[in-house]
Image: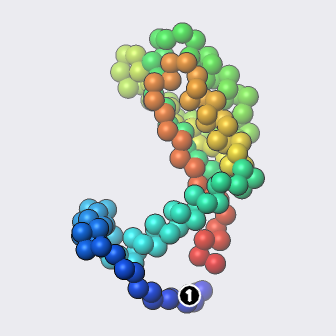
Amino acid sequence: MLEKNIVRFGVSIDEKLLDKFDKLITEKGYVNRSEAIRDLIRDMLVSHQIEDPEVESFGTLTMVYNHHHGDISEKLNNVQHDYFPNIVSTTHVHLDAHNCLEVLILKGKAGQLKAIADMILAIKNVRHGRFVIASTQSNLDE
């Protein structure tokens, strides 16, 4: 097992802000502040990594649309076929008689994935969408 060097450090923080943080980490189910702070640091490091458009990444694109509006289904299908090397999987769910939810799992260079997500979200009649990206590089704890 790889032995890690654990470093303790102090943080000065306003009491009210700390109270809010403690309530939040309790709601989120963290065992202690250290675990929550480690996750915050990792999140910032991944956010920094994916600023580089060449970093290998993965992500999810979630969108909601009304399939009766225009030719949106055909447009979405065409984009997904054009970028099939980057789209690992697609899940399509019928929310009601009109609305659909689609989730795409993407893999590739961060810049390209962001461009694909932007292109899809800009398609007319996509009502709502969100792209979440993370790096596949695992050097955060090294």
* Vertical comparison of 66 with 39: above or below: above
Let me know if residue 100 appears in the view.
yes
- x then y, percent, for residue 15: 25, 74
Residue, disc 1: 4
Give the side of residue 94 with respect to residue 18, left or right. right
Residue at the (65%, 71%) spot, across then down: 139
- x then y, percent, for residue 124: 55, 18
Residue at the (61%, 36%) spot, across then down: 117
Let me know if residue 56 appears in the view.
no
- x then y, percent, for residue 103: 51, 36
Give the side of residue 2 with respect to residue 15, left or right. right
Give the side of residue 37 with respect to residue 135, left or right. left
Q: Quadrant of the C terminus?
A: bottom right
Q: Quadrant of the N terminus?
A: bottom right
Residue at the (26%, 65%) spot, across then down: 20
Instruction: Give SS at disc 1.
Output: loop
Q: What amino acid type should be assigned to the residue bearing mark 1?
A: Lys
* Vertical comparison of 49 with 87: above or below: below
User: Could you say which quadrant of the image residue 24 lies in?
Assistant: bottom left
